[in-house]
Image: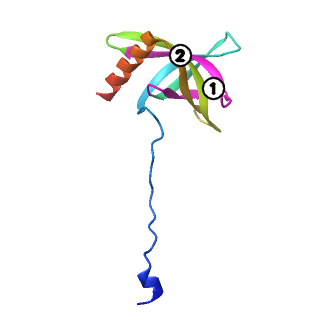
């Protein structure tokens, strides 16, 4: 045998390590958002949700580390619920596609009451 035949050949493949603390679920939700330095509200769309954050399409480019106030609207039971959170932009896709700017946000401050609503909504998505 030659030296090449004796040495193990390298193996190639894809490994995916999930770095998120909470699983994400698909949810097409309308949101209102406010920049911290403004009282003017804007609308956006959340595409997935977890107990720790959202993936949102904004009509404007957001900066990494920017804090925003969010109001999420979602169905739960027979009614429409809302929660309000303070969030930080932690991921920005600067490519403006056909659906605006895509950003990941982490929740910074959520009231216990709103967190309970959020957990109940996410639980309904996982069923």
Tell me which residue sits at (43%, 16%) in the image: 115
Of circles 2 and 1, which is in front?
2
Coloration of the structure image:
rainbow
Relative to 108, residue 84 above or below:
above
**Viewer-closest of 62 and 1:** 1
Where's residue 22, x and y in %?
42, 31
Left or right side of 24 for 68: right
Q: CA distance from mark 2 to mark 1?
A: 19 Å
Which stretch is magenta?
Answer: 50-75
Report which residue position mark 1 lands on: 59
Relative to 62, residue 38 above or below:
above
Where's residue 20, x and y in %?
47, 36
Task: Residue 81: name its quadrant.
Answer: top left
Q: Are marks 2 and 1 in contact (CB under 8 Å)?
A: no
Where's residue 83, x and y in %?
47, 13
Quarter of the N terminus within the rendering: bottom left
Report which residue position mark 2 lands on: 85
**Residues packed near mark 2 inside 10 Å, few (<14), some (14 to 19) or many (20 plus):** many
Residue 101, can we see it?
A: no
Tell me which residue sits at (41%, 18%) in the image: 118
Does dot 2 land on a helix, a strand or a loop?
strand
Residue 72, can we see it?
A: yes
Quarter of the C terminus within the rendering: top left
> Does 65 appear in magenta?
yes
Which residue is at the far left? 127
């Amino acid at each position: 045998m030659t030296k090449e035949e004796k040495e193990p050949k390298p193996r190639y493949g894809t490994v995916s390590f999930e770095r998120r603390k909470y699983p994400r679920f698909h949810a097409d939700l309308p949101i209102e958002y406010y920049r911290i330095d403004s009282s003017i509200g804007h609308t956006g769309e959340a595409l997935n949700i977890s107990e720790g954050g959202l993936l949102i399409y904004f009509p404007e480019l957001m900066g990494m580390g920017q804090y925003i106030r969010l109001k999420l609207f979602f169905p739960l039971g027979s009614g429409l619920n809302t929660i309000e959170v303070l969030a930080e932009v932690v991921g920005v896709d600067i490519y403006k596609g056909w659906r605006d700017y895509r950003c990941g946000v982490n929740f910074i401050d959520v009231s216990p009451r709103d967190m309970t609503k959020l957990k109940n909504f996410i639980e309904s998505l996982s069923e």
